[in-house]
Image (cartoon, rainbow, N blue to C red):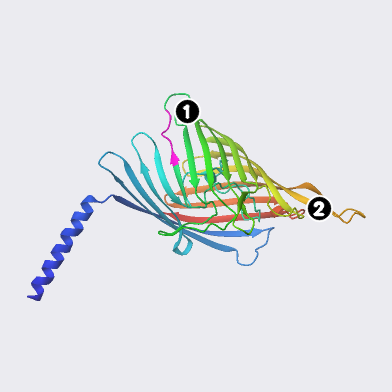
Amino acid sequence: MKKITKLGLSALCGSLAVASAANAGDISVTGSAEITYVTVDGNTVGHPFGMKSNLGFEGSGELDGGQKVALTITNTDKSAFSAASIALTTNNIGTFKLSNNTGADLGDYDDKAPTAWEEAWDGGQGATTDKISGVASSTNINWVSPATTGNIMGGTKLILAYAPRNNATRQNDKTASGDTGTTGKGLDVILDLRSGKKLSGFLGYSRTKRPHNDGDNHREPDGHKEEAVIGLNYKLGPFSMGYQHTAEDLKAQGDGSSHEVDMYLNKSWGVAMNINGGLSVSYGEATSNQIYTATNNGMGSGQGNQFTKKRKQKSKALNAAYTIGGVTAKWSSAETKNAAYSEGSDKEATLVSLGIAF
């Protein structure tokens, strides 16, 4: 009797599983792991080996009306949660997405210069370029318009991303953030331009409100943060090249003390070439200007005179990558003058890696 009961329950569970699977969408799993070895100024510093891994899940399905839904979850090193999004693609008014640390926003355009591997400032040489981000690191809602059609500007899209509180936090379910921070609403507006298969460009602007709390819960505007980007890429056969400018106006909120950063002005460019199906090489440069407030103590007055100064960090890098199936070997030689905006701190680094992906 017990045996019959077990068989009946198993059959019932199996039937339910089949029924659920019949109405479920598709799911795919991707993953990668990469080992790196770095030397700085010709020497190994501490432990030169590093490793990163990535595991992603993506589910998708289609509604009765033809709309498509998708869920993406990404886990990075040591299976720590990294990003997630839920998207709804409509038939004719674009894609709507709720994103946690991922999605269509200004952060996707921080450096679009072509490269075979890393950006010029990210080759292990200690550069700390301050990049535009918009609402990228906060829970946000974004919309991507349908692509335009036609031979001249076909493929062009408008992108809007909004975060009720752009404070670089991801909200869990059934929770709401407090109203005591100094960061308010954030909005990104991006025009992603296309002209055929060779030419592309982008214009982007972001504004984050930063209310000031006077201690009595009176909130007043206090120097809203603004970010902007403009860039152009061109591809001709195996060659590609790109150039862009970004600006981040922090409108420093402090008391005007020395070394208060007001703005970052960055520019970058790169050229890349696919030599064959598996081998690619690139060269790129990036310059970041940090504009800050300095104070001269003055003479005899007892009060300092404030003025603005600029620190320039300049990086350049040569990259190469070779892929065979799911295995990729990469090499980078990079150098930065005034690394981390520190005058006279010049760094050189050589970086190699071996990665696998599925």
Name which residue lies at 48% across and 35% down.
158
Locate residue 18 relative to residue 87 in the image: left or right: left
What amino acid is labelled 2 in the image? Thr
**Residue 134 percent coordinates (x, y):** 55, 46
The magenta span reads: 143-148
Image-quadrant location for residue 40 = bottom right
Q: Are marks 2 and 1 in contact (CB under 8 Å)?
A: no
Report x, y in % for residue 264.
67, 46
Residue identified by numbered label 2: 295
Q: Which residue is mark 1?
A: 196
Q: Image height check: is 149 above or below 333?
A: above
Counting labels gives: 2
Q: Which label sits in the foreground, 2 or 1? A: 2
Instruction: Label the magenta part by its dominant secondary structure.
Output: loop
Q: Where does the image place residue 223, in percent across and percent down from the top left?
A: 65, 47
Q: Is residue 202 left or right of residue 248?
A: left
User: Looking at the figure, which quarter contains the N terminus?
Assistant: bottom left
Q: Position of residue 180 (x, y in %)?
A: 56, 58
- How crowded pointer 2 is (Cα within 10 Å; few <14, some 14-19, many 20+) is rated as some
Q: Judge by depth and name the residue closer to the eye, 356 or 148.
A: 148
Label 1 sits on a secondary structure element that is loop
* Image height of 14 relative to 325, above or below: below
In this view of the protein, which residue sits in the foreground, 55 or 266? 266
Under mark 1, the amino acid is Gly
Q: Residue at x 27, y 39 (%)?
A: 65
Q: Residue at x 81, y 53 (%)?
A: 295
Mark 1 burial class by Cα count in 10 Å: few <14, some 14-19, many 20+:
some
**In front: 122, or 312?**
312
Q: Mark yes or no: residue 237 visible.
A: no
